Amino acid sequence: MRVLLIEDDSRIRRDVGTALEAAGFVVDTETDGEVGWYMGENETYAAAILDLGLPHMDGLAVIKRWRNAGRDLPVLILTARGSWTERVEGINAGADDYLPKPFQMDELIARLRAIIRRSAGHAAATIAVGDTVLDTRQMRVTVRGVPVPLSPQEYRLIAYLMLNKGRVVPQQELAEHLQSVHFERASNAIEVLVGRVRRKLPDALIETRRGFGYMIAE
Amino acid sequence: MRVLLIEDDSRIRRDVGTALEAAGFVVDTETDGEVGWYMGENETYAAAILDLGLPHMDGLAVIKRWRNAGRDLPVLILTARGSWTERVEGINAGADDYLPKPFQMDELIARLRAIIRRSAGHAAATIAVGDTVLDTRQMRVTVRGVPVPLSPQEYRLIAYLMLNKGRVVPQQELAEHLQSVHFERASNAIEVLVGRVRRKLPDALIETRRGFGYMIAE
DNA sequence: CTCCAGATGACAGGAAGCTGACAGGAGCGG
DNA sequence: CCGCTCCTGTCAGCTTCCTGTCATCTGGAG
């Protein structure tokens, strides 16, 4: 079982590498984001372990480029402890699981095996709200089992809202998260996008909280 | 903090239950998988502790059914020592952490607290005064469970007063907090706003302290 | 009883959000 | 390299309802 480890901290890199080899994995190690991306793109791995703070190309960007290219390589990201933002962004970018630092080697290995197994065709990482199910691995939304055709922006929007269900998400936060550089104040791009998503999904799913933002109830 | 303990071994059930209560948790105990699932589905817990070998419904099945229904209740599973398979399957099914038997009570409690803390991003941050509950994640106020429709200004006002309950808040401070540039002396905007909020909430909630400001009693 | 901070009802200007139409442009197949 | 399709941001028009102001009451303190 071959895995790709991308981590710039030499201490962690060595420790994790050793532990993974002891657990029976073949490990390729990279320290640079861009080189790591290239390896994942051109070689075959059972999974990748990815630090988020990397030289040359940020971990999130690495995942996104893999995903955009159709790579469904399972990815486990290492995040700073308690960084809710990183976690959500990571999962939203297409990561399969996250592990807050510092972590136990045992747990890393267990989770790594879990995502590998999951990618072998078993359970998917899903979030459900009523009839509507978000599958973050397939980057797809289904309603009563029927897939809903969504554009990339539309998917990112609904995914972010579902990952934050039960919480009011301000328009500003959505705009930042969708990372479209274009959004200016005095643009109603978010409203338009929400409208488009609403037309494709059950009506009451996305609540408007006038003056606050949007929310999906639990 | 209320937790759900599902365990069929009476010895472990009693020991764990006692330890949890000593640690300040309120514990609901179930021995049957299906009943446990039902409880988790219909009650509100800060977390669940789940044995994997259960009568009627296997622990893994319980987690999966919760997850499929969108329940993101943190789950700690108890596994047989060294059982890689169980660990991996547990995490794969959506468990947040696992603990191999036999275990130290201290460790169980530490890990339980950890997963509850980790899920705190999901948890509702609420403040209650009598029947009136402020939920800052949903940015909403409910009275006896019924949501009260509030405009942004109205919500900010009641939220600020509830966050400062038991203290007299001067009008000036309220005005500054609401950050409306418009407020000048000789404006009665605050009085008007308070009036609007009062009409939507239980009568005695906001006290007027003539000459000083407004207050919500504890 | 008098006075004045606070309460209330009415109102108008405008902020926030929704929608349909449109066009530039990215992505893709040929 | 061309042409087609789909994505996505912009715009104008419209609706809803928020919010500060004003004029007028009210009631408690002294």
Image (spheres, coloured by chain):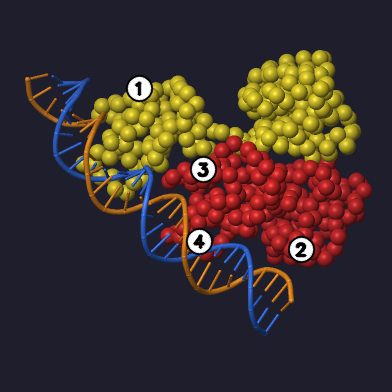
Chain colours: A red, B yellow, C orange, D blue
Query: In screen coordinates, is D10 left or right of D13?
Result: right
The residue sitting at 67% across, 37% down in the picture is B70
- Amino acid type shown at disc 3: Glu
Same chain assignment for discs 3 and 2: yes
- Amino acid type shown at disc 4: Phe
Q: Is residue B217 above or below residue A28?
A: above
The residue sitting at 51% across, 46% down in the picture is A214
Circle 4/circle 2 CB separation < 8 Å: no
Please identify the quarter of the rendering in which residue A109 is found: top right
Q: Which secondary structure, mark 2?
A: helix
Circle 4/circle 3 CB separation < 8 Å: no
- Identify residue for label 2: A37
- Identify residue for label 3: A207
The residue sitting at 65% across, 55% down in the picture is A149
The residue sitting at 36% across, 45% down in the picture is B179
**In the image, which is nearer the foreground, mark 2 or mark 1?**
1
- Identify residue for label 4: A183
